[in-house]
Image: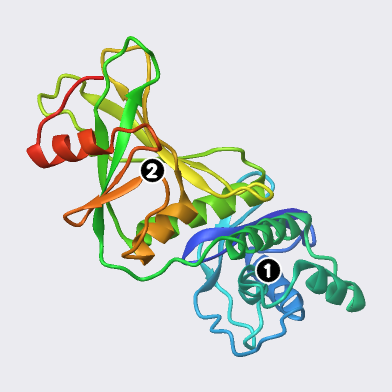
Amino acid sequence: MKVTVTWGQDTPAYATEVIEVPDDANDGQIIEAVMARADAVGNLVFDPSYDWTGLRAVEISAPDGRVIDNDVAIEPSGEDLGLVVRNVMSGAVSLEAMLHEAERQNIVPAQEVIGALKLAGDAMAARKALPEIPSFTPYQLVIDAFACNQDGDSPSYAAIEVKPEFLAKIARVSAAASAAGIRVAHVDADNGIWSDPDNSLRMRDSELVVYPQHGAGNTSFWFRGHPKNADYDCETRAIDLNDLITSVSTDGELPSGFERDRGVLFYDGGAGTAIDLRDLYFEGSDAEH
């Protein structure tokens, strides 16, 4: 019979695969077969120094859906599926090299495992193509905003605190989306980023929108939100990730569209509204477009 094994290590599962066991196998024999599978895949490992503690067959289920076990610790001799995944994700071993070694040893990894590893490897390659994120003191970024309906009201800006972790998050989302062939990625954002002092717009469903690096292009991002009682969205100007990294890495000339005043960075995307943004932000007031 065929049992389904979901591999993981503490948090989310690395891959799910189906393995064949004898029809008359009891639960103990099935678990032994799963552990043997971990040893077999472990033969592809090239770095025995990996800390494999925590690798689990987080769920083993029978063809009828019955859960045979849901927390089986896998403790082979330092070599396991988790290491294979980590090696491919880190770039230490290419997927092609792993599959070549599998062929040499006459081992056939499950297609689900290959798919998970390929996605992880592609994501890592895409991430390596992104610029490095420098260390810097967190600062406030104020971005010009507009309504996607020419007759609609909009916040004048969105204001966010930018930390290295925020830029790294954009880079991670871009890499994952690029590897998966996703044209645009959407991540939930705080509704409180919008300037709406009298709460007349009541912005909701806010999101960070990331346009991944495609070919020679750069990663860019913007924010989008929806006024509660409107039938249109509001957006900020799109920012090139490279330009934002440059802006936090220099005290000199800033990329086009950026202005700095009293430690706050303003971005109007070339719309010519930077002065207005500064006045509105520092005065703590707002104006409708």
Q: Is residue 272 visible?
A: yes
Mark 1 lies on residue: 34
Residue under the point 31% across and 40% down:
143
Where does the image place residue 85, in percent across and percent down from the top left? 64, 69
Amino acid marked by disc 1: Val
Element type where label 2 sits in the image: loop
Residue reaching furthest to the top: 151
Q: Which mark is residue 257?
A: 2
Q: Are marks 1 and 2 in contact (CB under 8 Å)?
A: no
Q: Is residue 191 visible?
A: no
Residue 111, quarter of the rendered image: bottom right
- Would you say 192 lies left or right of 173 here? left
Amino acid marked by disc 2: Gly
Residue reaching furthest to the front: 253
- In this rendering, is residue 202 above or below 189? above
The CA distance from mark 1 to mark 2 is 57 Å
